[in-house]
Amino acid sequence: MISKLLFCFFFTVPKCFASIPSVEEASSLVKFGPGTLSQCENFRESTAKSSDGATVNVIESNHPYSDDEHCVQVVGDENCSKIKFQITHFAVEDEDPEDDYRHGDGITHCEFDAFQMSWKDNGTTGRLCETITKNGMSRRQGRDSDYEGNDPEELGFYNEWNTIDGSWFAIFFSSDNGRTFYGFRVEWMCAMKIEDNQDDNSAIDQTGTAFIYF
C-alpha cells in the first residue's frame, strides 16, 4: 500500500486513487460486533433497465435472504469518479419497539437484521431496517419504523438517485437466526468518468477512508 501511494504521489496517476478496496480492507475499517466480516456469498450482481430506461448495474440479496449472514460486499468501477445509486426494493427485519435487546457493542437499533452502505469520506446510509417490499412488489407492509433514522424511504435512498464521490461503495449486511424477509435490491451506475473529472478532488485517495461504525 505504501509503495503504491508513493508512486501515485510522485507520478500523479489518476487511476492510482480509484482502486476499489478488497473485502479485507473494507472489513478492517468497520466495527461490526463480534467476529470477522467475510465476502457476501449470497448477493447477486447483474445489469438491467431502470424505470427511466437507463442501463444500470444491480446488486441484490437472495429473496429472502439467509439466516446468520454477517458480510461485506464491495462494488464499483475504477473508471468512475462519481457513482449514483438508488435502493429499489427493501425489506429487512425491523424490531419490536418494546424490546430491550442490545448487542455487546452498544448498537441500539436494527439489532436483528441490518443493511448499510458506506463509501468515500465517511459517507454512509446509516444502519437501515424496514419492510417496504412485499413478495417482490414495492409497497408498504407491516408496521412503520420503530426507531428514527432506519427507513431508506424516509431518508431519501428509496427510488431516488443519490450521487456519491468515488469509484466504489460497500454494502454491509447482518441477519440473526430468526425471521428473514425479502432483502434488498440496489441499482447503481457511473455518474462521472475519471477522465472527465481529473481535476476534481473526488478522484483522490479513496483507499484511506474510515467508515462510520456499523
Image (tube, rainbow, N blue to C red):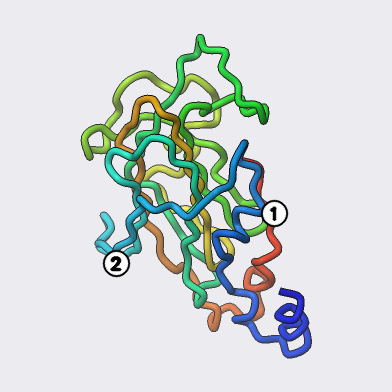
Find disc 1 in the rendering and name its residue: 210
Residue at left 45%, top 38%?
Answer: 152
**Disc 2 packing (10 Å; few <14; some 14–19; many ≥20):** some
Task: Kindly identify the amino acid type of the residue bearing the numbered disc 1.
Answer: Ala
Residue at left 41%, top 51%?
Answer: 86
Q: Are marks 2 and 1 in contact (CB under 8 Å)?
A: no
Q: Give the mark nearest the N terminus, 2 or 1.
A: 2
Residue at left 32%, top 20%?
Answer: 142
Quick check: 122 above or below 6?
above
Q: Which residue lies furthest to the front in this view?
A: 35
Horizontal side of residue 112 vs 199, given as left or right: left
Residue 55's disc number: 2
- Give residue 49's quadrant in the image: bottom left
**Disc 1 packing (10 Å; few <14; some 14–19; many ≥20):** some
Which element type, helix, strand or loop, lies under badge 2? Answer: strand
CA gap, disc 2 and disc 1: 31 Å
Q: Residue 202's spot in the image, x, y percent?
A: 64, 68
Task: Kindly identify the amino acid type of the residue bearing the numbered disc 2.
Answer: Thr
Quick check: 110 above or below 167?
above
Which corner quadrant holds the N terminus?
bottom right
Which element type, helix, strand or loop, lies under badge 1? Answer: loop
Residue at left 53%, top 27%?
Answer: 111
Q: Residue 113's spot in the image, x, y percent?
A: 46, 32
- Give residue 133's quadrant in the image: top left
Q: Residue 53's spot in the image, x, y percent?
A: 25, 62
In the image, which is nearer the foreground, mark 2 or mark 1?
A: 1
